[in-house]
Each structure stands twice: as structure tokens, then as C-alpha cells.
Amino acid sequence: MRKRLMKVLNISLITLVLIVLLFPFFWIVDSSFKSFAEIMRSSPSIIPKEPTLDHYKFIFTFRMASKDFPLNIYNSLRVSLSTMAISTVLAIMGGYGLARYEFKGRDFLSKSMLIVYVLPGVPLLLPVYNLLAHLKLVDSLTGLVLIYTALNTPFSVWLLRAFFDAIPKELEEAASIDGASRIQSFFKVVLPLSLMGIITAAMFVFITTWGEYTFAQMIITSDWKKTVSLGLATYMTDQYIEWGPLLAATTIVVIPVLVLFLPFSGFFVKGLASGALKE
Amino acid sequence: MRKFLVALMVVFAILSLAKTTIVFWHHEAPAHRVAAFQKVIKLFEKENPDIKVIQQVVPWGDAWTKTLAAIQSGTTPDFQFSIPELTITAYLANAIVPVDDLIKEIDSKYKYIKSQLAPYKFNGHYWGIPIWTMPMILLYRPSYLKKYLGTTEPPKTWDELLLAAQKITLLSSKEGETIYGIGLTAGDNLCTQEQVYTIMSNVGVKVFDEKGNLTFNKPETWRAVEFYKDLYKFSPPGSTGWAWGEIEMNFTAGKIAMMPYFGGLQKRFYEMKNYDLDGAPQPYPVDGKEANLIYPNDVHIFKSAVEKGHLEAVKKFILFMMRPDINAILTAEMEPGSFVPVTEAAQKSDQYWNNPVIKTFKHLNEVIIRATNYGTLYGFEHGYAANLAIGSISGANVIAEMIQKVVTGEMGVKEAVKWAESKMESFLK
Amino acid sequence: MNRGMLLILPVVILALLITAVPLVNMTYKSLQKTMFGFGKERFIGLENYVNLFTKDEDFLPSLWRSFLWVFENLLVQLTIPMLIALLLQENNLFNRLSRTLVLIPWILPLVVISVVWRWLLEPNIGYVGYLLRSVGLNSPSFFGNKALAFHTLVLINSWHFIPFGTILMLAALSTVPQSLYDAAKVDGAGAFQRFIYITFPMIGRTIWFVALLAFMWSFNTFDLIWLITEGGPADSTLTLPVYIYKLAFKMYNYGKASAASVVSTLILIAVAYAYFKVFSPKKEGTR
């Protein structure tokens, strides 16, 4: 009886937490189906009085070189997926190198992977822009991928190193006795065992790059190269916020991440548990 | 026949080789503004097939960082839309060219409203070409005036304004409604500075003297700040955190009866089929003068345009934008009431007055057009930039911070004005 | 060259590219009087630093505010995710679904978060104000009130971080062997006692690690504050990163902004160093 009561209490507490945490998002989705006049009402109602799909129609049909939401999504997918792929491969290499090979300064290197979090973002902006200008990568998605990879890979290395550490060396050695080369045994033994960590690292990268704004605004100028956060920013200017399209677009922007997350969120917890937190 | 075809192809080849592509940045991200720009570009390219024009949107919030970064790395566009502070920045960074010849040509063709040129004249030259301007006027809801004041006449003097704001606030709350007589902000932002300066201009506050020395800490400034503080009592609570977005939402939602503001809300009202909106000249004290803030928006040309040999094409496009029929697209169509023509010819043009929104709020727009003649901008009261430090002073929101200190009770009026002047002083070096 | 070094090399190069280059640039500029090439650049030694600490009336207050900001954020970001994680600890369908939903605030783009919270918390037309009014309360001015704006921003920033913190805490909790709990239950320990005597000691290190990450992230929070209050009202939310931005891009004092950035970086390096000194295992290979 008591156990049951606890369970009910637990569930209702969680529900309460979810309501508080998710209300802003709910409000965004909910209002995206309201007309502009209704969004502006000072006594709003939860259920839209006259539900409308106009804002959704607008963001998918107003397509002009300099304002093109479907293109924004496409660009963001390209940037986030490439960053995710490149960064994960580099992190697997780096994490494995740190975990399996002894060399001078290894410990220091491993710790200094957190250094990218030490620098304040604002003073990074101009030097990074100058750097990209030298490389002729200003206003290019490649430049953006480069910066995102540099910013995110160190954390992934940190995460994956612990994973590789946790896999007993003996397993690999056993495989190589069976005649497998180091690389073969890596693919056969290590990779499958650390898959969870790799997915975690990859998802982490995807999420942090998907909505990134500060560096994107600095690096990208051409309208046909804009990513989703830049696209969203064009719905709000100081003196004119296009509330309807903004809310509709936000709803759409969140969906790909949710879709990616749903099947893997359990992995995420487990991945972090056996990865980053081992330190 | 074949010869002809070959000739034609050669001509095409030459034409396409000779085609110049010019790129400009602007900061007007909303869809209808982007569309208006595109319309102008299309018309221009039709008349000038050898020039291709590309617009790129850089939102206002990012304009400074991006401009400075582009200047440092040599990646500037050919020209960009701007406001005085940004043009000063680009000038100080040694990145733009003087445009006296263009100003002269436009002035002789269409006659500039003189007040609009002041913010772009420094060190004896013009550095920006005003394209449209934003005058602040007293925007109000006629129905509220009628209901609570029993009149359709908006206030004309400071005393009347204060009284009206007080009356509306108190009477409406008696009826159980929350309507505030006046909408004033006191946030840490440009919006607040614009409103405060409109009040200041009524008593002739000047930031600098003719030589560029500070003249801010003066009795007329105290008077304006004092009045702002009194009036602020009848403004919605929370406006210490407000910027444009919040004050507009509150006015649109019917929480505010009057406010010194730009006329741009008329488009929203028009779309919502709400016609309860009008404007009046900014009230001023009996011993003051008719005046208000104006924010002319300009175009400045980067040196990179000259280096690339794009200058002629750029000039052509700018002249095209000033043609009254085209200028009407950039004003009446882009943001009716907020973006207002800066030349006499464009202000009188039929294209401007035939715009459905402008037509609907005809009286309001007449008030706005009139206000362009009485406008000034802080730091440019003498018809030119007396001291270029005004760029950083405005950027650092010194005037807004001063008002915050006053309305939150942190400082007395005189103390706050004195504080502001010493803060401004620190930018003069 | 060792093969391990070779494998980590690409990451090191990238990390250096994005940290060392700006760091050198920043340090160099901090010794100059420079305003984005407005006029000539001039070497002035440590003058920028001296000015910051002795003459500048905003620098020290903003530094102090940054510490306060981190402190309050840590307080919220360590306790609330812990509590949520405890609630979600048991593995069942409802909890698994909730774990995914909890992540939503984290994946919302920051540009939207700021504008939506400003809207929701606007006293006269926001939904929160409406709710308060409908129960007969007056909505305070969340961002306009000097005493309130700072804490409101802390809560919004934490709201954004809570999902990630919760996941980390959940992960930490899952490393505690169930057998320990079972043994304690047999001994008759209650839920609270189990938490204090088993869970807490077991995951203590994790909490410190989360604290380190949260420290570095919140110390550098810029966008959220800038987009909502620009450091106002009356400087009450002017933290160090916001001040650095204002110095550089609103007052064009790039030299001074660089000096302030160097100070900020040194502080964070010191914190990270202290963390590793205290918590890092002395010897490798003890795991």
C-alpha cells in the first residue's frame, strides 16, 4: 500500500516538474497555431480560439534568396551532420590514443581537453574571424564546420577516453593472438564495446551545433548559407517581431533533435555514466 | 544568319563579362522588408542589365561585430545601410569614402530635408547618404482620449500631457481596467534613449557645444529628466526592463493610451483591421519648442567598392533608390510610418501617399512627415557631428542608464545628469 | 613520434587553433592602446590592466557579479537536477519517456529562449503575469526590477542547463551498485539515510565534476544575458562577459576588453587547475 502511494507521489511529482520545465516549449507550439491578433491578446487562452496553420504555410512558402527557412534547415543539417561525423572520428582516434598509448604529457593533454571551455566566447570572435579570413573560409559552411569541430571535439575525446579505458586490454590482446592486426582488433573488439559512448559523443555534438548562434552569425553572411538559428533571428528585429512565423519555425527546428533523441536517450544516460563521469 | 548568331553570342559574352555584381548589407530582417528590397533590386536590374545587385541581411544586433570584423579582414560588402553611430564607427575605422558629390546631386534633384543630413556630416564632409528617416511623434489611441478625457484633441503642452496621462491612468483603474496614460521605457537600450531624447529636444538639450565640448550637465537637461520622471509614474510597471518589443506589444494589446514613438505600428493595426490609432506633434512646454527625435538611416560606401571598381554601379543604385517612386517602396511599403522619405520630392510623391496603409492613417502620416522638419538627434544639434565620441556614448547607453538610475530612485535628477556627463567625458579621449 | 601522440594530434591542432591563436592575440592586444585600428596602435605595457583595477568603475563590480552569478547558478544547477534525477531513477516506461522530455529546454535554440522568456514574463501581457493576476496577485517586473532581474536570469539560465545536469546526475546515480542499496535495506536504512550514506559518497566526485563544467559554462554566459537585459537595469546584470562585449563592441576599447578577457581566462584556468589538484587521482592506471 505504502509502496503504491509512493509511486503515485513519484509520478505526480515528475509530472509537475515536467509541466514547469516544458511550459515555455508548450507555449511556443501552442501559440504557433494562433493568429497574430490572438497571440497579442493580454488575456490568452490555452486552447487556440481559431486554430490556424498560416504561420507554417508562411515559413515554407515565403522563399526568397535572403529568407528561406527550408534552406536554413538543409544548411543546418549539413553543418551539424558533418561536424558530428568529423568530430566523432577525430575523437575516437584521440580518445583511443590517450587510452592505449603511454607517452610523455599524456595526462596533461587529457586534462587540457577542457581548455576550450576556459576562454570567454566574446573575445574569441574577432581572432577566429581573422583566422578564417586568412584561410579564405569566411562566409562558408566549411569554415563553420571547422570551428564547431574545434570547439566540440575536445569534450568528445574526454568522454571517449574513459570508455576505451574501461575496455580491458586483454580483450584486444586476445584478438591479436588470433591473428588480427591492431586495426582489425580495434574494429572488431573495441568499437562495438564502446558504441554507446560514441553515440553519446556524436549526439552531444549534434545538439550543441544545431542551435548555435554566436559563431554562425559571425562567420556566415550570404543568405543562402544561413543556418536555422540565423534564420530564426531574421524573424525578430528590435522593432518588429514576426511572432507567428518565429514560433512555427521554432517548433519545426526542435523536431529533428527530438526524433534523433527519442530512440537514444537511454543510451545518452548510460553513455555518460560509463564515460565522462569516470574522469 | 549564322554570322548574326555568332555576333549575338559575342555580344552576350561581352555583356556577361562586363556584368558588375554589387553586394550590400542591410539590417531589416522581417519578411516584408526583405521583399521590398528585392522589389527595388528587380526594378533596378531591369533598367540596368549590366549590374547585378545582391542584398544580404545582417540583423541589427550583429551589425557592429560583423562590420568591425569585416573591416579588419578586408571582407566588407560594397555598401551598407546604417545609422549615424555605425557610420561613425566605419569612418573611424577608416573604411568608407566621402559622398559629398552624391549628396549634392540628390539635393539638387529632389531637395533633402536639411535636418536629415546633420548626422552624417563630420570633419567637413558627408560620409553617409540618408535614404529614409524615423521621426518620433506622440502616438495615441483616439478612443481612450475620448473615453477618459472627453476630447478628441491630443495634449499640446507638457502640462497637458502629464495631466492627460494621469487622468487616463486613474480613471481607467477606477473602472477596473488597467490602461496606462503614457508608455515610456527605462531599459538599458537604444529605445529608451530615443524616447528620453525626444523629451530633451523639447527644451533644447545639447550634448555638445559647437566645438565639441560637453554641455550636457545643464538646467535644461535637469528639467527634461525631471519631467520624464514625473511622466514615468503613469507608465506601465516593468518598463525598466523594456525595449521596443515590449512597448509595442503593450500598446498593441491596448494597455497604453499615448507614447512618444515611431509611427510603424500602423501596419500592424492595419492588418488587424484596428483603426484606433492617430498621432500628434510631440507636446512641448510653453517656453519650449516643437522638436522631436529623428533617426535618419543612411547608406555608406566602403573603400572596397572603389578598389573593386564598383563605385559607379553603387552610385547608380543609390541614385535609383532616391527616385521618389522607388523611395516610396523603401518607405511606405517597407515600414509605413516608421521609415519616412528624406527628400521633399519623395515626401510629396503620389506613390507614397497612395500606399493603402499610408492612406488609411492619413492624418497620422501627415503629422509624421511634418515632424521630419523639426527633428534632431543627440550629439548632432548643430547640424553636424560636433564630437565623434557620440558614437560610443550612444553605444554605451549612457542616457538610458542615467534614466534608469533616476526612475529606480538610485540617484536624484541632478546627481544622475552629472554622473552621465562624467561618463560621457570618459569617452572623449 | 609515439603512435598515441599521432592519434591525438589532429584534435590538439584544432584545439590549439581555436584557443592558442586567440589567446596570443588577446594577450598582445591587452598590452596595446588599440581601438580597432581607429588611429595608431600603441604599446602601453600594463596600463590597461592597471586602469581596470584602479580606475574603471564597472570592472570590479562586474567581476564580483560574475562570481555571484556562478554561485547562484551552481546552487540551482546542482540541487534541482539531483532531485529530478532521484525522481527519475527507477527504470520504467514512464520515466524513460520523461527522461527524453526533460531534455527539451536544452535543445531549444538560445535565440528563441531569450525572446520567449521576455514575452512570458512581461508583467502586463505575458502568460505568467496573467496567471498571477487570475489568482489576485500583481505581477512583479521580472527584468525591470533591480533586485529581481539577476535572480530571474539565474533561473532561466538554470532552466536551460537543468536537462543536461539531470542526465549527468542520472548517469552518476546509475553507477551506484544496486547491491549496496539492497544491503542497506536489509539493515533497515530509510530512503533518506540511503541517500546520505550510500549515494552521496559514491557520486560525490561526479557532482564535483558537474560543478566544474557548470562553473566554466556559467562564468562565460553571455548571449542569454545580453539578449534579455543588455546588462541592465542599472547594471544589475552586468557580468564580466557582458562587460567585455560592451567594452569591445560598444565602446570600441579593444585593448581594455582584451585585458579583461585575459583576467577572465586566468580565473578559469586557476579554477580548473585547483579542481585537478584536489580531485585528480595522483597516479595513472589506478582505475
Image (cartoon, rainbow, N blue to C red):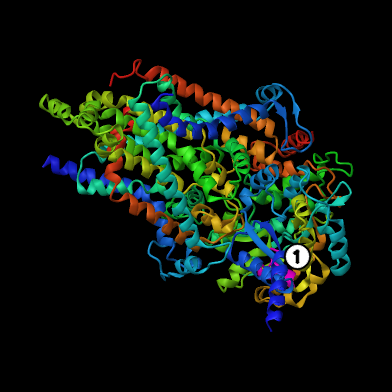
* Side of B290 relative to B29 (left or right): right
* Dot 1 crowding, Cα within 10 Å, few <14, some 14–19, many 20+: some
Q: Within the image, what quadrant is residue B162 found in?
A: bottom right
Disc 1 element: helix
- Tell me the quadrant of the picture where the C terminus of chain B can be found: top right
Residue C202 in the magenta stretch? The answer is: no
Q: Residue at x 57, y 74 (%)?
A: B273
The amino acid type, in three-letter code, at marker 1 is Phe
Residue A27 placement (x, y as % from top left): 41, 56
Q: Residue at x 38, y 52 (%)?
A: A257
In the rendered image, which residue does mark 1 sit on? Answer: B317
In the displayed structure, would residue A15 be above or below residue C262?
below
In the displayed structure, would residue A49 be above or below residue C127?
below
Chain letter of the residue beneath label 1 in the structure image: B
Residue at the far front in the pictured view? B2
Task: Give the magenta part as a residue range.
Answer: B326-341
Please name whichever residue, B308 or C86, is drawn nearer the observer in this view of the structure: B308
Please name whichever residue, B5 or B210, is drawn nearer the observer in this view of the structure: B5
Residue A154 placement (x, y as % from top left): 43, 34
Please name whichever residue, B296 or C75, is drawn nearer the observer in this view of the structure: B296
Residue B338 in the magenta stretch? The answer is: yes
In the displayed structure, would residue C254 be above or below residue C120?
above
